[in-house]
Image: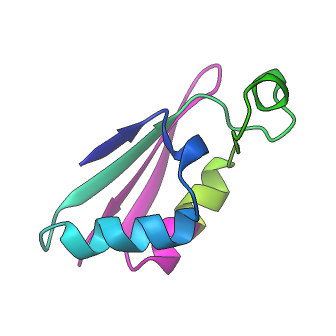
Amino acid sequence: MTAVETVYFWPNLPDCLKEVSRVLKQGGKFAIMVEVVDGDSVWTNVVEGMTAYSPEELKMLLDDAGFTQTEIHRKKPSYTTIIGVKP
């Protein structure tokens, strides 16, 4: 399961990630792909309702939602993928 450039707009992200974990099969992987990783980004100032999360924040939120083996994969300049596995 993937979320590409969308978690910026998910309401109550912690609850949403718990729901993703609930519906994902055991051993399933969830990947979050983001480009905007800085809360002070020009995008967060011009796009209404957008919240940027650092890769570390997203990893922590995945961990808190029950995912394991969470990993951060960075690509320059700011593309990042965070992957978690449902135990």
Task: Pick whichever, 6 or 57, lies toward us.
Answer: 6
In this image, 72 relative to 77: left or right?
A: left
User: Residue 86: x and y, percent?
Assistant: 25, 72
Which corner quadrant of the image does residue 59 belong to? bottom right
Q: Residue at x 30, y 54 (%)?
A: 30
Q: How is the structure coloured here?
A: rainbow
Number of numbered labels in the structure image: 0
Q: Residue at x 40, y 74 (%)?
A: 18
Reply above or below: 82 against 69. Answer: above
User: Residue 78: x and y, percent?
Assistant: 64, 26
User: Residue 74: x and y, percent?
Assistant: 54, 35
In this image, 47 relative to 6: left or right?
A: right
Reply above or below: 73 against 5. Answer: below
Q: Residue at x 69, y 48 (%)?
A: 54
Which corner quadrant of the image does residue 16 belong to? bottom left
Task: Pick whichever, 65 or 76, lies toward us.
Answer: 65
Q: Residue at x 26, y 76 (%)?
A: 22
Quarter occupied by the C terminus: bottom left
Q: Which residues are magenta?
A: 61-87
Residue 53 within the segment the image draws in magenta: no
Task: Pick whichever, 78 or 61, lies toward us.
Answer: 61
Which corner quadrant of the image does residue 14 belong to? bottom right
Reply above or below: 84 against 23. Answer: above
Residue 79 within the segment the image draws in magenta: yes
